[in-house]
Image (cartoon, grey):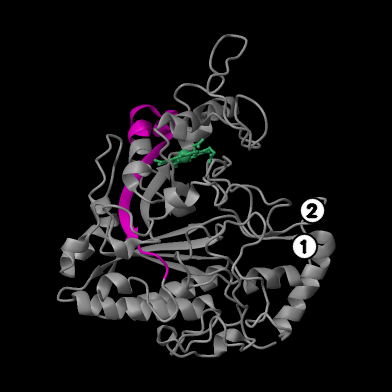
Amino acid sequence: MSNPLTDPTSDPTSGSGSGSGSGSGKSSGVRAGSASGSPAGSPRTSPGVSPGGGDHLDISRRRLLGTVGAAGAAGLVIGAAGGAGIAAAVSEDGSAAGAAGPGALTSVGATQVAFHGRHQPGITTPLQSRGHLVAFDLAPGAGRKEAAALLRRWSATARTLMAGKAPAGDTGIALDAGPSSLTVTFGFGRTFFDRTGLASRRPSQLDPLPAFSSDAVDPKRSEGDLWVQIGADDALVAFHALRALQKDAGDAARVRWQMNGFNRSAGATARPTTARNLMGQVDGTNNPKPTDPDFDRRIFVPAGAAGAQEWMAGGSYAVVRRIRMLLDDWDQLSQEGQERVIGRRKADGAPLSGGSETTPLDLNKTGPDGKLLVPDNAHARISAPEQNGGAAMLRRPFSFHDGIGADGTPDAGLLFVCWQADPLRGFVPVQRKLDRGDALSKFVRHESSGLFAVPGGAPEGEYVGQRLLEA
Ligand SMILES: C=CC1=C(C)c2cc3[nH]c(cc4nc(cc5[nH]c(cc1n2)c(C)c5CCC(=O)O)C(CCC(=O)O)=C4C)c(C)c3C=C
Ligand SMILES: [Fe+2]
């Protein structure tokens, strides 16, 4: 079988790259929709479909069609309920499809996400099983020119890698692997604009987040001039991208902090369910869905919005928090106690007011004792949009585990990443409320924080951020 990663490509931002539409037959083609249940906007490609959408079949497609053929009985599902999900192959009776078949593995590797588009990838893309969050600071002396050249290099590399190809001078780390749903997302921190002489174009949405009383934030692991989010369904593919982007930074920028995360692997569960976090809760159920009528307005900056910087059209703001979970304390709670902290059942994520996972919370329902079924300090109650003037965000986290901390407890928790058109109408009001009375607060600690402006996706022939850096 041919190995797409051994085929170097030319500079994608010059418009001559072959990642999406060259008909090379080495990688999956790009299509404009996402599979049922998968968030729209940053489509994963139909694995193995040839770029022209014609009848050219490469070996990986033929292998994949074997899977899809099996999926006629088995059902190939990309994405999961609850907005951000994980690709998985499942059978109609719920058992893992093709669990032993090579096709199932191929489908994970072959899945490709489009680099170009109205929005950057990695926002509405289903959760991937591996993630790296990295902040860079521009090097002393580096300004707008160096930043523009860096974003051009990074975009070229991201586009090449997301197409399952190797950039020039490749390390070989991901040899044999397909793109594995790789996404690379770029953002700008508040300090970027002073360093590049672009302060007049800094959006007010990047004003510092308020300090929250329960914060224990380490400034060295917070903020940064530039932010890169890498996600992939394979650990080597994700590391490969990290390494390539870090090398691209060259003398222009240095890593300020790096965090590594994970989610469940595709195919690990019999049914594609909403993700679980390290506290064991079903987490992500009430995320806004791309099919919601107000989804775009809530998550993405509209073109021509009053007071918005035009270069942010189609972009979004990412709030990033490293939230340590105090797991030893959490484990002391009974299951009932844990469920009352969240307001949902642990097993299936159903509200304590009744129904199944997707039943809306009934915040007024009381039990036979007259007490609220969803307690007044339950996390799901306090964070609900109806309790926060409609404030909503798209949560797209990774779990992390960095060994055992100095206190002898797991240094583990949630790399909380949430997306919104305006943090003052998303994260801030909700976190203010949680800070005051969330039952979960006793069991978590916010240890680092970042706020980044993530511009819209690059059109073909452009690089991410070009409209800011070259206007
Ligand atoms: C400020 C925003 C939020 C932070 C920080 C946060 C941390 C956090 N959350 C969980 C676990 C769950 N959160 C759930 C729901 C939920 N959480 C937020 C916001 C923050 N969470 C929102 C907006 C919502 C949705 C509320 C709604 O619309 O009903 C849930 C319930 C299931 C779900 O809807 O996802 C869980 C579980 C942890 C463990 C955590 C910090 C480590
Ligand atoms: Fe939450």
Task: Determine if residue 222 is in view.
Answer: yes
- Which segment did they paint magenta? 432-457
Magenta stretch: includes residue 449 = yes
Would you identify the image quadrant in which residue 99 lies?
bottom right
Residue 46 against residue 216 in the figure, above or below: below
Q: Residue at x 33, y 70 (%)?
A: 465
Residue type, numbered disc 1: Ala
Is 241 or 290 nearer to us in this picture?
290
* Residue to which mark 1 is pinned: 99
Would you identify the image quadrant in which residue 437 lies?
top left
Secondary structure beneath disc 2? loop
On the picture, is 326 further left or further right than 181? left
Would you identify the image quadrant in which residue 4 lies?
bottom right
Tell me if label 1 and label 2 are in contact, CB under 8 Å: yes
Magenta stretch: includes residue 180 = no
Q: Residue at x 63, y 78 (%)?
A: 28
